[in-house]
Amino acid sequence: MLSRSSSSSSSSWASLRSIQLIAISVFLYCSATDRFAQAQELKAQNKMTSRDNNYRVEQLPGPRTKLGEGPVWDIDTQSLYYVDISTPAVHRYDYAENRTYSAMLAGANSISFIVLVAGQPEHFVVGENNRVALIRWDGRSENAQHVRVLADLGNSQSHVRFNDGKVDPSGRLYAGTMQLETLGDLFAQKEGQFFRYSNGTMVVQKKNVSISNGLTWDEPGNPSRLYYIDSGALDVKAFDVDANGDLKNETVFYDLRVNGAHPGYVPDGMTSDADGNLYIATWGGSKVMKVDKRTQQLLQEIKIPAEQVTSVAFGGPQLDELFVTTSSNGDKPAPAGELFKVTGLGVRGKPMYKMVL
C-alpha cells in the first residue's frame, strides 16, 4: 500500500504527463492542418495556372496575308472583317461557313483598317493610303467599290499612310498614321499622328507618333477612357476623353520594357474584354499579352504560332473567341500571315461599334 505522499506525487506526475500529451497532440494537429492548407493552396494555384493556359489556338481557312490587320467582328452577319494592308485587300471570315472571302479595291496602295457603318449594311469605312474612304462590298465579290472620300490628308502628308483605326462607343472614328515603310526608320522619324474624324476633317489628337497602333475603350466601366499604343513608345497610354471626343490627361498605363530594357518586340493592335482587361498583340513576340485593368499587371501570355502578331478582336456567337491576325512580312514561313482563333480563355469580349456618318 502506497503512502499519502507517494500517491500525491504520482498524481502530479500523471497530470503533468497528460498535459504534455495534450500539448503534443495540439501541436501535431496544427502542423497537419497547416500542411493540409498549404497543400490545398498549392493545388488551387496549380489548378489556376492550368486553367489560365488551357486555351486552344486554331488556324482558320483563308489567304496568307502579307500584313494582316484590323479585325472587326460584325454581330449582324456573324463575320470577322479584316484587311491585308500590303496586298491590299479586305477579307470576311464567315463563321457559319468557316470560309474567308476577299476583295480588292481599285486604286488603293494600302488598306489599313476597316470599320462597320451604322444603318448602312454592306458599307464600310477604310483607311486607304493617306485618306479615309467609304466603300461598298457585299462580302462575297472579288472587288469592292468606292462610294466617296470622307477625309484626305493631302499632298503635305503624302509620306504617311493610315494604320490602325476604330470606332468609339459614341460612333466616332479614331485613326492614326505612320511614315511609309519605304522612307526609312519608322521609329526614329516619328512622322505619324493620331486623329479623330469629324465632319470631313481629321482632328489631330497626338503628334510625333512613330507607328499609330492599337486602341480600345474602357467600357462599359468608363467609356470616357481610351487606351492607345504608339508602337515605338513601348507602352500603352491612357487618356481621358472629353465631351467633344478630344483626348486629355495622358498617362502611361502599361510599360512593356523589361527592367527598363527593350523586350525584343513591340506592341501592335489591341482590344479589351468585358471586364476591361487589355489584350495586346506583339510584333516580334509570338504572343498576345493580357493585362489586368485594375492592377496594371501582366495576367497571361497567349502563345501564337507566328512571330509577327498584329491585332486581336473578340467575336463568335458568344463573343468568347479571340481572333488574331498575323503577318508574313520578311518572307516569314507559314503559318505566319494566317488568321487564328483562340478558344477556352474563359472570358467574353464586347460588341464592336459602328461608325455614325
Image (spheres, rainbow, N blue to C red):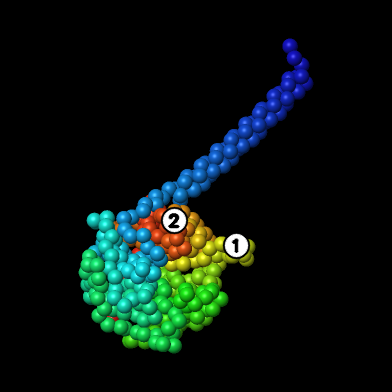
Marks 1 and 2: CB-CB under 8 Å? no
Q: Left or right of 96: which side holds 300?
A: right
The quadrant where residue 339 appears: bottom left
Q: Who comes first in sequence, dot 1 or dot 2?
A: 1
Q: x and y percent of residue 259 in the render?
A: 63, 62
Residue holding disc 1:
258
Residue with the mark numbered 2:
333
Q: Is residue 319 above or below residue 43?
A: below
Asked whether, in this view, residue 280 is left or right of residue 131, the answer is right
The residue under label 2 is which amino acid type? Pro
Depth-wise, is mark 1 or mark 2 nearer the camera? 2
Residue 356 in sight from this viewpoint: no
Question: Looking at the image, which residue sits at the far top?
Answer: 1
Q: Residue at x 53, y 72 (%)?
A: 232
Q: Position of residue 115 (x, y in %)?
A: 32, 72
Secondary structure of the residue carrying numbered label 2: loop
